[in-house]
Image: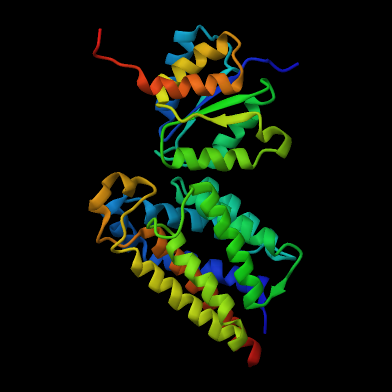
C-alpha cells in the first residue's frame, strides 16, 4: 500500500544543494521518512548539472512508495529535465506528478510541511508556489 | 535514393565529429550569453551517443534515434540534454518501422522533433533558440521536395544557416540568456548553431551515402 502523503523531490544542479535542501525541509516539517522527501542533483559525471536519468530513477523509486510526487527544481535545465523525466513515466503515472513553480528552498520547506499534514498534490503545489512571497526583513 | 538508417548513423557520427571540432567556438558563443557549457556538454553527450550506437544493429529509425535521445538526455547535463533528447526521440518515433524515407517524410519527422522541443521548452520561432534554425529548414525541405531530395536538403541547410544568423539581432526569451535582456542582442545563439550543424550533418550523410551508392 503506497503512502497517501505527497512525496517531495528536490532537483538541483548540485547534488550537495539538493541533499542539503532536502535535509532542511525534512527537519522543518518533521518528515523522517526518506521515502517521502528526497533530493537529486548533478550531472551523471558527478559535476554541476542535471541528468534526466537520475531524476527519472529518483522519481520512479518515490512512486513505488507514495501515490504522488511534487518536484521542486532549482531553475533552467532542472525544470526542462524534470519535465522530460515525467514524460518518460508510464502514461498512467504522469498525472501523479507536478512540477512546482517555486523557489527551491522555501518551496521545498512549505511543500514538506503541507504534505506532512495530508494536503493533496494540487494543494501542496499551490502552497509551494506561494512561498515565493515569504519576506525575510519585515520582522 | 532514399535516406537510410545507415545514413542516420553516419549523420550522428559526423555531428559528433563536428561538435568536437567546434567545441571551443560553441563555448565562446555560450560564454557571451549563457553559462559557457554548450560545447563541452554537447561534446560529452555525443561521445556517449557514439559509444551506444556505433556498432549496434538497427532495423528502423526509431531504434537509433531512441538510443541517441535517451543517451543525450542523461549525458549532456544542461538544457540541451532534454531538448536534443526529445528532438531525437520524437523524430525517430515518427519514422517508426521505416528504414528508408524521402526528404519529405524526413521533414515531417523533423517537424515532430521540433514540436517536442517547443512543447518542452515552451519556445517559439523568434525566441533566439535552436527552434530558429530548425523551423525554416523543415519548410525548405518540404517546399523543395519536388526539385529532388539532394536539392531539398541543400536548401534546408541553407535555410537553417540563415535562421541561425537571424538569431544575432534577436532578444533572448528562453533560458539563461533571457536573464540578460537587451544584452543578449548582437550574439548568435549557441543552440541554433549546434542545430544548424546537426542539419548540415544529415545533408552530408545523405550526399555521401548517395555518392557511394552510385559508384
The way the protein has been coloured in the rendering is rainbow
Can you say whether B76 is above or below B168 in the image? above
Give x and y (percent) for residue B76: 47, 49
Residue drawn where x is 58% and y is 76% of the image: B142
Give x and y (percent) for residue B74: 54, 45
Please state if B189 lies on the left or on the right of A121 as rendered. left
Residue drawn where x is 38% and y is 54% of the image: B38
Give x and y (percent) for residue B4: 67, 74
Q: Quadrant of residue B207?
A: bottom right
Residue at the farthest bottom position: B215
Residue drawn where x is 57% and y is 30% of the image: A98
Please state if B195 lies on the left or on the right of B116 as rendered. left
Residues B130 and B62: in front is: B130
Which quadrant is home to the N terminus of chain B?
A: bottom right
Residue drawn where x is 71% and y is 64% of the image: B58
Residue A19 appears anywhere in the view: no
Residue A67 appears anywhere in the view: yes
Can you say whether B111 is above or below A78 in the image? below
Please state if B76 lies on the left or on the right of B36 as rendered. right
Question: How many discs appear?
Answer: 0
Give x and y (percent) for residue A41: 47, 33
Which quadrant is home to the C terminus of chain B?
A: bottom right
Residues A20 and B83: in front is: B83
Can you say whether A78 is above or below B190 in the image? above
Amino acid at each position: 500500500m503506497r503512502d497517501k502523503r505527497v512525496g517531495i523531490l528536490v532537483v538541483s544542479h548540485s547534488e550537495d544543494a539538493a541533499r542539503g535542501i532536502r535535509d532542511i525541509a525534512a527537519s522543518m516539517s518533521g518528515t523522517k521518512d526518506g521515502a517521502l522527501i528526497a533530493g537529486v542533483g548533478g550531472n551523471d559525471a558527478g559535476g554541476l548539472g542535471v541528468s534526466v536519468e537520475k531524476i527519472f530513477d529518483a522519481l520512479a523509486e518515490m512512486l513505488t512508495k507514495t501515490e504522488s510526487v511534487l518536484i521542486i527544481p532549482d531553475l533552467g535545465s532542472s525544470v526542462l529535465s524534470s519535465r522530460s523525466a515525467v514524460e518518460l513515466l508510464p502514461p498512467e503515472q504522469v498525472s501523479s506528478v507536478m512540477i512546482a513553480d517555486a523557489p527551491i528552498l522555501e518551496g521545498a520547506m512549505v511543500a514538506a510541511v503541507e504534505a506532512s499534514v495530508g494536503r493533496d498534490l494540487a494543494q501542496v503545489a499551490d502552497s509551494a508556489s506561494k512561498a515565493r512571497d515569504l519576506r525575510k526583513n519585515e520582522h | 535514393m532514399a535516406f537510410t538508417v545507415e545514413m542516420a548513423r553516419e549523420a550522428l557520427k559526423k555531428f559528433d565529429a563536428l561538435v568536437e571540432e567546434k567545441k571551443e567556438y560553441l563555448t565562446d558563443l555560450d560564454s557571451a550569453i549563457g553559462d559557457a557549457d554548450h560545447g563541452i556538454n554537447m561534446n560529452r553527450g555525443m561521445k556517449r551517443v557514439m559509444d551506444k550506437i556505433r556498432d549496434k544493429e538497427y532495423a528502423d529509425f526509431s531504434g537509433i534515434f531512441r538510443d541517441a535521445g535517451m543517451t543525450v538526455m542523461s549525458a549532456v547535463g544542461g538544457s540541451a540534454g532534454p531538448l536534443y533528447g526529445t528532438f531525437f526521440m520524437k523524430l525517430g518515433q515518427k519514422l517508426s518501422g521505416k528504414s528508408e524515407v524521402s526528404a519529405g517524410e524526413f521533414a515531417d519527422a523533423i517537424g515532430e522533433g521540433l514540436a517536442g522541443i517547443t512543447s518542452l521548452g515552451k519556445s517559439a520561432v523568434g525566441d533566439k533558440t535552436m527552434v530558429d534554425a530548425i523551423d525554416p529548414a523543415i519548410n525548405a525541405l518540404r517546399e523543395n521536395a519536388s526539385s529532388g531530395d539532394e536539392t531539398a536538403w541543400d536548401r534546408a541547410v541553407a535555410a537553417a544557416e540563415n535562421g541561425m544568423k537571424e538569431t544575432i539581432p534577436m532578444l533572448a526569451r528562453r533560458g539563461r540568456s533571457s536573464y540578460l535582456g537587451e544584452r543578449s542582442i548582437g550574439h548568435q545563439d549557441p543552440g541554433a548553431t549546434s542545430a544548424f550543424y546537426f542539419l548540415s550533418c544529415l545533408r552530408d550523410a545523405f550526399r555521401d551515402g548517395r555518392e557511394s551508392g552510385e559508384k
